[in-house]
Amino acid sequence: MQAIEIKNLSFVYSARTPNEKRALDDINLSVEEGSLVALVGATGSGKSTLIMHLNGLIKPQDKKRSSIVVHDMSASDKKALKKLRFEVGMVFQYPEYQLFADTVAKDIAFGPKNMKLSAEEVDARVRRAMQVVGLDYDEFAGRSPFDLSGGEKRRVAIAGVIAMQPKILVLDEPVAGLDPAGRKELLALIKTLQREISPTVVLVSHNMDDVARLADRVVALKDGRIVADGAPRDVFADRQLVKDIGLDVPFAARVVDNLEEKGISLDKHIITDEELYNALTDLFASAGKLKKPAPEEEFFDDEFFDDEEFFDDDSEEDEEEDIIKDDPEQECTVPEGACLEAEENDGSEKTKNRRKDMTSDKGPARARGEGGGNV
Ligand SMILES: Nc1ncnc2c1ncn2[C@@H]1O[C@H](COP(=O)(O)OP(=O)(O)OP(=O)(O)O)[C@@H](O)[C@H]1O
Ligand SMILES: [Mg+2]
């Protein structure tokens, strides 16, 4: 079943003025219930304009031609508007700027109160929302939202949206401005919210690693038009398309491309760190270069890959010496879809330099350390 159906949607800002700007140009998009769709595109491509149509904040300009239907409600129907706003929870960029009440509990209660729910139900929803976003009720309910940390404020703001228990959650760059730990927690939270509150999620993101890790589907906009739509691994595999859209590829795909330049071919569909690790481990194993057996797959959770040391230059060099020994005669047998050119005639120095190419200031590993991948 489709949660959202958009047909022939165009939008022009400041029409018939010198500042006229066509922000959306004939968008046709359906979002299946229960999916997590990432909306990506360069700055100014129309992402925010598009999502603001989903709960009626912006109305279709050409009502005859365009239609937006959300769970059988038309976004053009004035009578359905209120219900639509409860159905589609919208978390804007820097939502904490919209906090206003003198306590956390009152702020979160604002939406449910607007729904005319009983006091008991409002209280129950506040407690549940706080629990889901990981804010202890006894500790935070009575505090001023303005005295909280940035990450806590953002949780309060998100709790205020999910307390209305929207079936569709729309997040516009929800991790912007958070530190790496806060970012990681919030990304995990999005999955929890999808599982427990809002089965359908539309996530606007500039971070392709987040998209690769979270999304079932990626929809890319360019100049107000949809220019790519598909599973993240398929969209990112088309490097030229991604470049044309003005996007980056995930860290793992950048490593694949860097290795390709060095004559090592890995699958272009690799988009997550885990997939990259597994492909490299397979490669080393089949070349007889793996000293220790590869740990079981379940071992590799996000914690493991977010460990700074895993991508630390110095520790890598030491590790490198452990794993790869000089062996100019070594012939490589490689797994399907991968090819290692055994050209290491000058031993470990060259090997080290290769690895350094991947981890230099210009290289992908450092960019990733800062949560890289931004366009
Ligand atoms: N209120 C406005 N008045 C006039 N033009 C606007 C207005 N809001 C957005 N635009 C223009 O419409 C286009 C699409 O803007 P929009 O904010 O939807 O892009 P976006 O993809 O969300 O960008 P970003 O990634 O920077 O948030 C841009 O060219 C922008 O300059
Ligand atoms: Mg925007």
Image (cartoon, rainbow, N blue to C red):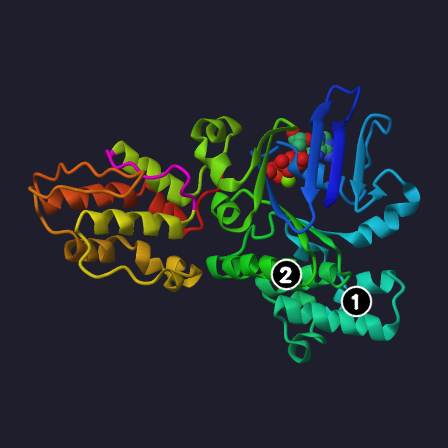
Residue that appears at 83% across and 49% down: 84
Q: Position of residue 215 (x, y in %)?
A: 56, 47
From this viewpoint, is residue 99 visible? no
The answer to whether 314 is drawn above or below residue 139 in the figure is above
* 211 relative to 116 in the view: left or right: left
Frontmost of labels 2 and 1 is 2
For disc 2, the neighbor class at 10 Å (few under 14, some 14 to 19, many from 20) is: few
Q: Can you identify the residue that label 1 sits on? A: 109
Single out the residue that lies furthest toward the bottom: 138
Q: Residue at x 34, y 62 (%)?
A: 296
Q: Of residues 258 and 95, which is closer to you in this image?
A: 258
Ligand 1 image position (quadrant): top right
Report which quarter residue 145 is drawn in. Answer: bottom right
Quick check: is 10 in the magenta stretch?
Answer: no
Query: Where is residue 325 shown, x and y percent of the image?
Result: 11, 51
| Cβ of mark 1 under 8 A from ligand 2 | no
Residue 343 x/y as whole percent:
13, 36
For the stretch drawn in magenta, the main secondary structure is loop
Tell me which segment is drawn in magenta: 262-271
Image coords of residue 83 (percent x, y): 86, 52
Task: Classify 263 as above or below 372.
Answer: above
